[in-house]
Image: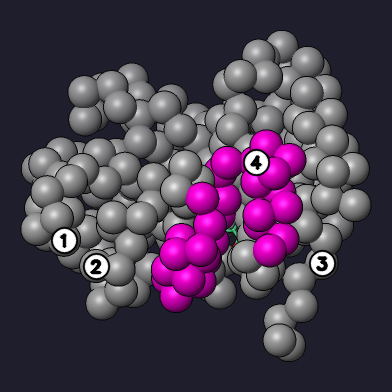
Amino acid sequence: MLRENLQEVEEKIQSACRRAGRNRSEVTLVAVSKTKPAATLQEAYDLGVRVFGENKVQEIREKYQVLPKDIEWHMIGHLQTNKVKYIVDKVRLIHSVDSLRLAEVIEKEAEKQDRIVDILLEVNVAEEESKFGLKTAEVLPLAEKLTALSHIRLRGLMTIAPFVENPEKNRAIFANLHKLYVDIKEKNIDNGTVSILSMGMTNDYEVAIEEGATMVRVGTGIFGARDYSI
Ligand SMILES: *Cc1c(COP(=O)(O)O)cnc(C)c1O
């Protein structure tokens, strides 16, 4: 099942790249493994997956302990400031920075642990009440402030688009975030380290790739439906 799912996702990524005239190597697949047991992640690992996305600090800590050390862990969920210290040494990328306060806590912890942490700014492009993330207009001012934090490296932007039946409905959102991403790249904030645009989930990653995503976060499409009751 996992093998077939991975193959199907891979084929869809490739055809979206082809449609957009992009190279497959421009798009990183993050396998979103939240709620799935470590044994399932190990199975995906054995099939070649190395990049996993999780949205809970506790889950990252537990899985990090028992799974191979060459896994690249991505924190994709809302991050509470009091939990930052548990993951700065474990994650390759934090997708969900949405305030200066959180960035400052990451900076402080990274300095303490003598490392540099790669982050994305999470943007609530659709300005949905229920979601975390910066408003579009807040992104550039915050990006500029981050340049003062020497243990944080701004790598790009992330968004969680609304859940829609028809992924075409999210195309404008992806296009808008891409535009903002290009603006930030052109301003050369943080010495050209901005090169990641994380957008697109199971339901809409092909459209996201067509609109310029360099990272897609796919959970259900790889691992099947999640069971939150356990
Ligand atoms: C759960 C989650 C995903 C994956 O969602 P699917 O629809 O299962 O692909 C992607 N990004 C974030 C931030 C998530 O929390």
For the residues labelled 1 and 2, say whether their Cβ atoms are less than 8 Å apart. Answer: yes
Q: How far apart are the alpha carbons under marks 4 and 1?
A: 29 Å
For the residues labelled 4 and 1, say whether their Cβ atoms are less than 8 Å apart. Answer: no
Residue marked by disc 4? 49
Q: Whole-percent x and y of residue 159? A: 53, 50
For the residues labelled 3 and 4, say whether their Cβ atoms are less than 8 Å apart. Answer: no
Disc 2: CA contacts within 10 A as few (<14), some (14-19) or many (>=20): some
Q: What segment carries the magenta color?
A: 39-68
Dot 3 lies on which element?
loop
* Ligand 1 - quadrant of the structure image: bottom right
Residue marked by disc 1? 109
- Left or right placement of residue 34 versus residue 72 in this view: right
* Earlier-in-chain disc, 1 versus 3: 1
- Left or right placement of residue 199 versus residue 15 in this view: left
Amino acid found under the numbered disc labelled 4: Val
Mark whose residue sits in front, 4 or 1: 4
Q: Quadrant of the C terminus?
A: bottom right
Q: Quadrant of residue 20?
A: top right
Q: Quadrant of residue 61?
A: bottom left
Q: Is residue 120 visible?
A: no
